[in-house]
Amino acid sequence: MAHKSRKFHGNIHRRGLVDSGSAKKKDFSVGPVMLGFFVFVVIGSSILQVLKSASSGPLASQAM
């Protein structure tokens, strides 16, 4: 606890000055494979929905 207090008091006057060791590198929260899979599923399902509604005709969508 005392170590954290000393560290805080030592840094209180150096506001805005961050040493490069403590700055973290920004990483993606999801990998490129998962992002590609998600895009594939979303776009694929929307294309299938459009094809299904186009092939069923205009009256089938109004009946629901």
Image (cartoon, helix red, strand yellow):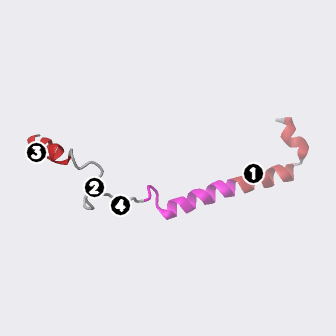
Residue under label 4: 25
- Mark-to-mark CA distance, 4 and 2: 13 Å
**Residue 33 part of the magenta-drawn span:** yes
Q: Nearer the viewer, mark 1 or mark 4?
A: 4
**Residue 52 part of the magenta-drawn span:** no
Residue density around tag 3, few if under 14, some if 14–19, many if 20 or more, within 10 Å:
few
In the drawing, what numbered circle is on residue 49? 1
Residue density around tag 1, few if under 14, some if 14–19, many if 20 or more, within 10 Å:
few
Q: SS for tag 2?
A: loop
Q: Please tell me which of labels 1 and 4 falls first in the chain.
A: 4
Q: Answer left or right for 49 relative to 1.
A: right
Residue under label 3: 3
Query: Residue at left 44%, top 55%?
Result: 29
Residue 46, percent from left and from top: 71, 53
Q: SS for tag 3?
A: helix
Residue 24, percent from left and from top: 32, 58
- Mark-to-mark CA distance, 3 and 2: 19 Å
Residue density around tag 2, few if under 14, some if 14–19, many if 20 or more, within 10 Å:
few
Residue under label 2: 18
Q: Please tell me which of labels 1 and 2 falls first in the chain.
A: 2
- Mark-to-mark CA distance, 4 and 3: 26 Å
Query: Residue at left 21%, top 44%?
Result: 12
Q: Please tell me which of labels 3 and 2 falls first in the chain.
A: 3
- Mark-to-mark CA distance, 1 and 3: 60 Å
Q: Please tell me which of labels 4 and 3 falls first in the chain.
A: 3
Question: What amino acid does circle 3 point to?
Answer: His
Q: Nearer the viewer, mark 3 or mark 2?
A: 2
Residue 9, percent from left and from top: 15, 43
Q: Which span of residues is magenta-colored? A: 28-45
